[in-house]
Amino acid sequence: MNSNKNLFLTSLLVISTYINFAQTKSFYFGSKKDVKNSINVKSPIAYNPDLGYGFDFNTTNKVKVTKQALTAEGSVYFSVKLPEGNYKVDVVIGDKKPSETTIKAESRRLMLKQLKVEKKDTVHFSFTVNVRTPQINNNDAIRIKARDKNQLNWDDKLTLEFLGTPAVQSITITPVSNITTIFLAGDSTVTDQDVEPWASWGQFFTNYISNAAVVANYAESGSSLSAFKAAKRLDKILSLMKPGDYLFIEFAHNDEKQKGPGIGPWESYTNLLNEYINKARDKGGIPILCTPTQRRAFNSDGSLKETHGDFPAAMRKVAINASVPLIDITEMTTKMYESWGDEVSRNAFVQYPANTFPGQFTKLEDNTHFNSFGANEIAKCVVQAIKDLNLYLAHYLRRNIPKYNPLAPNEINNWNLPLSSRFEVKKPDGN
């Protein structure tokens, strides 16, 4: 009897090990030798959904596979067909020549910024990434806007973009469960902007989070609290939320435009904030309120105009009454823009002369939406606030992040993150 029981348990262990191995996908790039338990990619192969992996967006011609690594000049995409879930991605970087590797995941979420590796050196780097679909259950799904349906965030694969002069020896993708998830709910200033030159702090926040947590950014351009809820994005978050997960809530830009009885900062906006808070807490989640990023609008004396009316004050009051941590992005971005001044602050926004980007025949002059430099500065503000508020969430930050002071923001001259190769001139929804 005991021997049969032991045999049964051993069989279960073998099956379990096989299932876990089957779920892990490992790719080795190199023509030198085969690597056991890896898919050997010895030449640039285009993505094929039947095959389940390959180089995407017509970038195979930019790829060179050396004896031990994928190398490229510029931006290349590698996609792997995967189900919805959270994944740990381990990459081994380096080749016989010096390299500089930047990695973005899905809709341009920054994971690794310009890692320099000397010739013949090897560096192991890992990060976590959230892969998702609009589906909530068999009968329900998030309502995705027509212009957003082709975004990398919503397809059936994980796409990694390698930029600079990358040299990648291998990629191992492992499903992870029971990981702390940081959900983001917000508008165009928070969402993963799919294409250049638009960017938001949520897609740079990922670069500051350790492997102990994962960021799931459900923010949507043009969204208000009511629109986010109506599109069932909140339902999707709540369907996935576990005790100990976080929910960041940043809205106002589009709520301000709503009119009618009962609409406004002290009524509908306040009521909906409390609803989000209560629903997150009912799931055991930890809500965090974030006041909205400022618009770039200066008075003649160099001070910033208050374009959000009473909405930041209403959120601050909700935070006090509901005992919710508050990250005052409005206050921090006010300090930041005023420290830069009217002219220099343009460098943080999508403001470019005509013909800067492919198909851009007129100048871009946006005072709401950020470029990658500006988005990263705001992400740094959020990270610093997490530390200053002494939130437990600080345990999930990467180590040795420098202190950030919005009264002494960085200058764009020190920013040279490689641009992704996908562009769109049309601005995101919302203002």
Image (tube, rainbow, N blue to C red):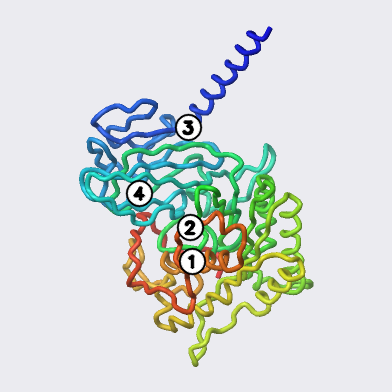
Q: According to the image, label 1 marks what residue?
A: 380
Spot occupied by residue 230 in the image (x, y as percentages of width and height): 69, 56
* Image quarter of the C terminus: bottom right
Q: Mark 2 and mark 1 in contact (Cβ < 8 Å)? A: yes
Looking at this view, is 238 or 309 the one in front? 238
3D distance between C-alphas at marks 1 and 4? 23 Å
* Image quarter of the N terminus: top right
Foreground: disc 4 or disc 3: 3
Q: Give the amino acid at mark 2.
A: Tyr
Of the residues under marks 4 and 2, which one precedes in the sequence?
4
Residue at x 63% of width, y 48% of height: 142
Q: Quadrant of residue 266 in the image?
A: bottom right
Residue at x 34% of width, y 34% of height: 28
Q: Is residue 106 left or right of residue 284?
A: left
Q: According to the image, label 3 marks what residue?
A: 24
Residue at x 31% of width, y 68% of height: 355
Q: Give the amino acid at mark 1.
A: Lys
Disc number placed over residue 208 in the picture, else none: 2
